[in-house]
Image (cartoon, rainbow, N blue to C red):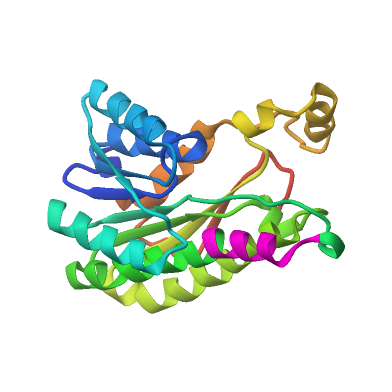
Amino acid sequence: MKNMTLEGKIAVVTGGSRGIGRAVCLRLAGMGATVVVNYVSRPDAAESTVAEIISNGGKGAAYQFDVSSSDQVQSAFKQILADFGHIDILVNNAGITRDGLVAMMKEQAWDEVIDTNLKGAFHCIKAVSRPMMKQRWGRIVSIASVIGFAGNAGQANYAAAKAGMVGLTRSVARELASRGVTVNGVAPGYIDTDMTKELPPEVTEKIKAEIPMNSLGTVEDVAAAVAYLVSDESRYVTGQFIHVNGGMFMG
């Protein structure tokens, strides 16, 4: 569709080197955006994503920074603005897991997940808010999870971070709506990634049995939802979450 083009837009995707983040980078680049691929510790994977973007005729660059560090985020976004002149799209995708039952969870495991998954999104949103308000156009999309809505044993820290992202998204949506900036989220269910590929077959089958569509989603399914939310097609949508989970959770 005509309004699905992102020509001339600059998009920053955190955790963009693999999995869902990589798929989002490729999708946005395919729509015409110049994509900043953020990574922390896998420069080879980030450069591979950029190389694929370029080989497909798109434009992209890799930037290293840790979203959990306010100083690193501020420095990186200042550099991105200097390099490209503006930032139009932010996709908060960076995330980690440190699973364990809450009765035995170390405080460090709690803090690391909250700092990366939730505070990291806050840092990045704060960094782009003023530039987007000034230009009166912006799209912010955060990747949450079905776990943030339904909960999951052994993932109290991850669920809390993703649930917090819901409140963060809806609050910032109210703050920025009058300036032409929309703030939304995508909540994936079980997606076929490197992480799920490591599960034993019997565990995968058990998961599928809990999903009405009886299959795992793909990273492209998630990227398609992000593509809609960052386009002009979604100009009147803000403070919302698209659930991409095959019917596993309907909220």
Residue at image x 36%, y 51%?
230
In depth, the one of 153 and 185 nearer the eye is 153
Residue 199, located in which quarter of the rendered image? top right
21 to 136, vertically: above or below? above
Give the x, y percent position of residue 66: 42, 55
Residue 1 part of the magenta segment: no
Give the x, y percent position of residue 101: 83, 57
55 with respect to 48 (left or right)? left
Give the x, y percent position of residue 151: 76, 58
In depth, the one of 186 and 4 nearer the eye is 186
228 with respect to 211 (left or right)? left
Q: Quadrant of the N terminus?
A: top left
Q: Is residue 55 visible?
A: yes
Residue 37, located in which quarter of the rendered image? top left
Q: Is residue 181 visible?
A: no
Residue 112 part of the magenta segment: yes
Give the x, y percent position of residue 234: 38, 54
Residue at image x 18%, y 59%?
81
Q: Quadrant of the C terminus?
A: bottom right
What is the count of numbered marks?
0
Point out the stretch of residues depicted in magenta: 105-116
Residue at image x 38%, y 59%?
140
In depth, the one of 127 and 64 nearer the eye is 64
80 with respect to 125 (left or right)? left
50 to 186, vertically: above or below? above
23 to 247, vertically: above or below? above
123 with respect to 89 (left or right)? right
Q: Main secondary structure of the magenta part?
A: helix
